[in-house]
Image (cartoon, grey):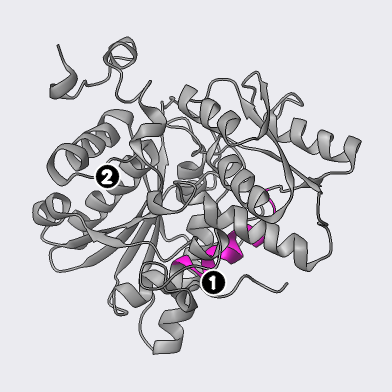
Amino acid sequence: MTPEPDSLTRHGWKTPSADMASAVGGTPLIRLSRASDATGCDIFGKAEFMNPGGSVKDRAALAIIADAETRGELESGGTIVEGTAGNTGIGITLVANARGYKSVIVMPETQSQEKIDFLRMIGADLRLVPAKPYRDQGNYVHVSRRLSEENGWLWANQFDNIANREGHRLTTAPEIWQQMEGRIDAFTCACGTGGTLAGTGFGLADAAKAAGVTRPKIVLADPEGSGLYGWVKSNDLSISGSSVTEGIGQSRVTANLEGAIIDDAERIGDPEALEQIYSLLIHEGLSVGGSSGINVAAAIRLARTLGPGHRIATILCDGGTRYQSKLFNPEFLRAKNLPVPFWLDE
């Protein structure tokens, strides 16, 4: 596999980017003041919502498409199909637009209206399907695979295509390592495909080995309703509870997660995640979505376990505007018995 050039060679904010793809990555690493002050640690959030498509999934989309191009699986005018909770579909559609491809995106109809509208706006051929578990052949992943087989389209297969995690190993991890000057004790991240957690974990381990220092601790942040917390803790993928978060949580071990470095896991409930989302917004001016709240909450828990003086990084996956109709909608929150931010509580 010939990877996309290392993101450290793309200066992002400092110099002009040659095209859209060259602007993916190089995102800021922001110290989260309230989380840091509350724990006596330095907790940093990688601002992935500042990618061109607005999320960390731009990296996976670019890595998957670049890998397919290298393998000769994509030609000008070709079509890419993918099953997604939304953000990967947005990233794929934008990269496809920039490189002369068409995109067909299959998504559960339960995802936020903001993501549905945005995908249609940017030109995706959007196919909404009923939300079904992975074991059901009507699941959006299986529908996208069948569309690929029936039409001869490229299936991005983000869950089991390890070009996904390789993109994070080659870009996200080196960026974090450089931005933290190699002084990082731990990394927390939620999983959908597993690409961000696994790839960044591998890359941080690579960097630590090259520097001759102890690698950071890698900790899964998992919502209720996902089996991965139990998988890490006791090799049990059983599921209990549910979450309003989108795009994270899993009932199986994907190819991207196979062999991943995961030292521990934290299970985070929706109220705890929402507390962090609202705190980041009203106190620090950072508008983020549900998975970011899960990630930051896990980082705070981990910081309290490690004790003062440690340095922890996590991912701010996407922006809050993609969830306005849910996470910032008082009616939706009250119907779920979830806290309403005071500035919206009328």
Q: In which quarter of the image is the C terminus?
A: top left
Q: Quadrant of the N terminus?
A: bottom right
Q: Which residue is drawn at 32% across and 41% down?
A: 288
Q: Which residue is drawn at 58% across and 61% down?
A: 165
Q: Does 202 sit left or right of 183 as displayed?
A: right
Where 325 falls versus 12 (above or below)? above
Q: Does 340 sit left or right of 89 as displayed?
A: left
- Where is residue 41 drawn, in percent x and y? 16, 62
Q: How far apart are marks 2 and 1 (CA)?
A: 26 Å
Query: Which amino acid does the dot numbered 1 rest on?
Result: Leu
The foreground one among 65 and 224 is 65
Query: Mark 2, residues whose alpha carbon is within 10 Å: few (<14), some, or many (≥20)?
Result: many
The foreground one among 213 and 116 is 116
Please say if the residues under marks 2 and 1 sit with CB atoms less than 8 Å apart.
no
Query: Mark 1, residues whose alpha carbon is within 10 Å: few (<14), some, or many (≥20)?
Result: many
Where 263 falls versus 3 (above or below)? above
Asked if the stretch drawn in magenta spans residue 45, the answer is no
Res. 297 mark: 2
- Where is residue 97 drawn, in percent x and y? 65, 48
Residue underneath mark 1: 170
The quadrant in which residue 89 appears is top right
Q: Report the magenta residues as a range.
A: 158-172
Query: Which amino acid does the dot numbered 2 rest on?
Result: Ala
Q: Would you say the magenta stretch is mainly helix, strand or loop?
A: helix
Where 178 falls versus 25 (above or below)? below
Element type at mark 2? helix
Q: Residue at x 35, y 44 (%)?
A: 292
